[in-house]
Amino acid sequence: MELNHLPSGYEPPALTDELQPRTSYYTMYFNLLRYNSHKVLMPDINIRKIIYTIRHKYLTFNNVVIAAAFLIAASWVWGSLEVMQRNYTLQKEVDIKERQLQLTKLQRDSLELQKKYYQTDEYKELAVRDTLGLVKPGEKLLILPENSEAAKAADAPRQQMAIKPESSPNLQQWLNFLFGGNSKSINTADKN
């Protein structure tokens, strides 16, 4: 071991028996090791203190119970949100399928009515008259002139009233939209 803090060329005096340390070399070696290990183990002692503090200050039974309750509540809330999202998407699908079912029922009913109409004698007679140009005995063809401007003007308000749908107040429309008033009227029409 070299001493760097001494001036160059300096030699220590030879140790005599009087100046010899009374401890053995082994004792000095172990003291040196213990000193060095003490320096190395100081951070370990700080970590041990931190672990001891955490264990005795924060990991108490009450804190563990509160943390477990918090985890259970958080998992319950997360599960509830997932179930609510799934129910929402499934309800949307059910609503779409119900609308498709209602539309299909209306189309089926319309086709049944058309089928019944096509089977009637009146339709058969009109189809023969239209395609073949046949008439019944004693019938005569009546050709009318086109409507005058006065007749067209008189019919215009009636046509506009027939085309214009029923209007309800804005508040009523919002209430129907928000609370499903329109779907209730559709459901009552299905029952009839």
Image (tube, grey):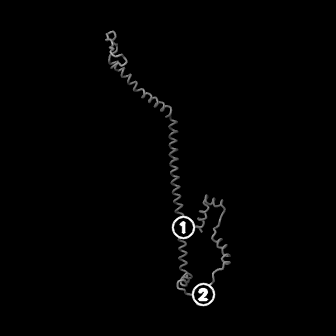
Q: Position of residue 15 (x, y in %)?
A: 32, 11
Q: Which residue is under mark 1? A: 103
Circle 2 SS class:
loop
Q: Amino acid at mark 2?
A: Leu
Q: Residues within 10 Å of mark 2 (few under 14, many from 20)?
A: few
Q: Is residue 179 above or below residue 141?
A: above
User: Relative to 101, is 10 on the left or the right?
Assistant: left
Q: Which residue is under mark 2? A: 141
Q: Position of residue 19 (x, y in %)?
A: 34, 10
In percent of the image, x 54 and y 86: which residue is there? Answer: 133
Q: Quadrant of residue 157?
A: bottom right
Q: Amino acid at mark 1?
A: Leu
Q: Is residue 73 above or below residue 16?
A: below
In percent of the image, x 32 and y 11: which residue is there? Answer: 13
Which sits in the foreground, 146 or 111?
A: 146
Distance from Cα at disc 2 to Cα at disc 1: 42 Å
Q: Is residue 186 above or below residue 138?
A: above
Which sits in the foreground, 77 or 151?
A: 151
Q: Is residue 119 above or below residue 81?
A: below
Which sits in the foreground, 142 or 50?
A: 142
